């Protein structure tokens, strides 16, 4: 059977590519190895609570924003119900060393006013810093429709690190903490993170902050409904074992079952370091193979899913970042758990009634669980005991840093082994390939005609990054100016 495009991986980027191509009249097939599409994003239920596992909130979806235009173009705006996070403080920072707390309001001007009032001597520096981020956060192809596609990624590879940029605030280490805390959400330390990466992620939140009623599950279901309406196909439990090639171009894929499926284009949304093992030797140039092999990955994490027997109202429509000490935000995985920065969010943010579920993300290294490595989804009793021990330790940590969280009940814990199994990222890298200074991440188009890449390694982590990656990849097939023309009509 011949398709115009086969997409490997039914995550957000894969579904975005599939929808864009199917709408253009292409015959599209999405292959997913797991039993359901988007297993990382759709979340799960435990103990009567729905937990988002890969989506918590989105920045930059305010009315008339460039990211909202993408939502409108995909058809998501009419399918999803958004709710705004707390205007007076959507993200809160607590510094354990000093006991200080800070809350970021929504909107660049509101942040300027609040922080300028708290740090009057830094008022001008705060305003200049935020003006710079406001100008840069959406300066990416398919967000800024006047940006040349050829310029994509160049500024991020070079230039200053976030750590260097924040030296302007050295007299005010609390501001350094506030302006670097979102590095926890893209997995690159401030001394290695390009200022443009931080501007894209943090700046989108400064602009506007929304959740989706129904969370990641509602988002995935909406994309699936739109894809079905466009005539796209999805096959789950279909793991690809090899890419089929001729000397000049891609031909299709071979499944683990032995079935071969043919297509003019194949889009791979897996972690790019996995690409060489799907291809025959000699197809990729040695320099490109070396580049893929040496791509640096983000750290992994422990993700806690817990239940509280009292209300977590203080986390409604807001998140809590906890940092051990002031200064540029650091999440050193070599430190004991008790000395790491972490992130907390309430489960079921968009629901009515009492909130009792909690999600906590604590950076971790694969080495912490490597001794219990085993074939996928098969775990020893020793590992399960270790997992329970780590989970209880983390609940104790949460309660120590935030007394309102005393008495939590652990319902589930994802470890670096869990993340590796679901995402296939090496060592469970929570955000996959990082966007480090000096690292040239792969572009969507490869040298083998018809073979393209997509996913967060192409653009950036998070909902914004994965959707933009989908447009970058599909635009390479459909024509960037044609696709950007459609977006201009949706503004």
Image (cartoon, rainbow, N blue to C red):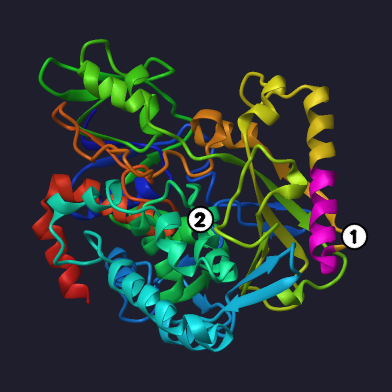
- Where residue 329 sits in the image (x, y, percent)? 57, 57
Left/right placement of residue 131 relative to residue 357 reads left
Residue topped by disc 1: 407
- Where residue 120 sits in the image (x, y, percent)? 52, 87
Left/right placement of residue 325 relative to residue 482 reads right
Q: Nearer the viewer, residue 296 or 458?
A: 296
In the picture as drawn, the residue positioned furthest to the right comes out as: 407
Quarter occupied by the C terminus: bottom left
Q: Residues within 10 Å of mark 2 (few under 14, many from 20)?
A: many
Is residue 285 covered in magenta?
Answer: no
Q: In the rendered image, is residue 56 in sight?
A: yes
Marks 1 and 2, the one that precedes in the sequence: 2
Left/right placement of residue 155 relative to residue 40 reads left
Residue topped by disc 2: 183
Q: Secondary structure at mark 2?
A: helix
Q: Residues within 10 Å of mark 1 (few under 14, many from 20)?
A: some
Residue at image position (47%, 60%) is 219
Q: Quadrant of residue 272?
A: top left
Q: Nearer the viewer, residue 284 or 26?
A: 284
Left/right placement of residue 204 relative to residue 176 reads left
Q: Quadrant of residue 294?
A: top left
Region of the chain picked out in magenta, as a range: 391-405
Image depth: mark 1 or mark 2 in front:
2
Q: Secondary structure at mark 1?
A: loop
Q: Is residue 222 above or below residue 124?
A: above
* CB under 8 Å between discs 1 and 2: no
């Amino acid at each position: 059977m011949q398709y115009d495009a086969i997409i490997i991986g039914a995550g957000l980027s894969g579904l975005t590519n599939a929808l864009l191509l199917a709408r253009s009249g292409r015959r599209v097939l999405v292959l997913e190895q797991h039993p359901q599409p988007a297993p990382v994003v759709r979340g799960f239920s435990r103990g009567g609570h729905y937990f988002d596992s890969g989506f918590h909130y989105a920045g930059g979806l305010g009315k008339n924003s460039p990211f909202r235009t993408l939502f409108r173009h995909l058809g998501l705006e009419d399918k999803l119900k958004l709710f705004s996070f707390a205007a007076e403080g959507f993200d809160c920072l607590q510094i354990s060393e000093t006991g200080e707390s800070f809350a970021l309001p929504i909107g660049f001007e509101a942040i300027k006013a609040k922080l300028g009032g708290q740090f009057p001597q830094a008022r001008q520096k705060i305003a200049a810093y935020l003006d710079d981020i406001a100008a840069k956060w959406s300066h990416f192809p398919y967000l800024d429709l006047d940006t040349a596609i050829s310029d994509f990624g160049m500024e991020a590879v070079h230039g200053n690190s976030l750590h260097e940029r924040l030296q302007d605030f050295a007299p005010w280490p609390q501001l350094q903490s506030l302006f670097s805390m979102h590095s926890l959400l893209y997995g690159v330390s401030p001394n290695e993170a390009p200022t443009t990466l931080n501007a894209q992620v943090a700046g989108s939140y400064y602009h506007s902050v929304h959740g989706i009623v129904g969370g990641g599950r509602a988002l995935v279901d909406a994309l699936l409904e739109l894809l079905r309406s466009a005539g796209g196909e999805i096959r789950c439990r279909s793991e690809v074992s090899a890419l089929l090639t001729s000397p000049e171009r891609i031909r299709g894929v071979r499944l683990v079952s032995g079935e071969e499926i043919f297509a003019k284009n194949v889009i791979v949304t897996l972690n790019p370091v996995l690409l060489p093992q799907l291809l025959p030797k000699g197809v990729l140039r040695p320099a490109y193979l070396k580049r893929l092999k040496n791509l640096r990955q983000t750290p992994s994490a422990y993700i806690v899913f817990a239940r509280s027997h009292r209300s977590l109202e203080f986390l409604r429509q807001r998140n809590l970042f906890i940092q051990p000490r002031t200064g540029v935000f650091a999440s050193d995985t070599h430190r004991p758990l008790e000395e790491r920065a972490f992130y907390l969010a309430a489960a079921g943010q968009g629901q009515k009634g009492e909130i009792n579920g909690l999600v906590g993300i604590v950076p971790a290294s694969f080495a912490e669980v490597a001794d219990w490595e085993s074939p996928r989804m098969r775990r020893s009793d020793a590992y399960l005991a270790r997992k329970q021990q780590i989970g209880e330790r983390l609940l104790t940590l949460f309660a120590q840093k935030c007394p309102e969280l005393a008495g939590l009940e652990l319902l589930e814990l994802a470890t670096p082994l869990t993340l590796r199994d679901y995402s296939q990222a090496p060592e469970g890298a929570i955000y996959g390939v990082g966007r480090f200074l000096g690292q040239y991440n792969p572009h969507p188009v490869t040298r083998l005609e018809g073979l393209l890449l997509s996913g967060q390694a192409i653009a950036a982590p998070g909902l914004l990054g994965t959707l933009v990656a989908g447009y970058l990849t599909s635009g390479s097939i459909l024509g960037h100016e044609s696709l950007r023309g459609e977006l201009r009509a949706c503004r």
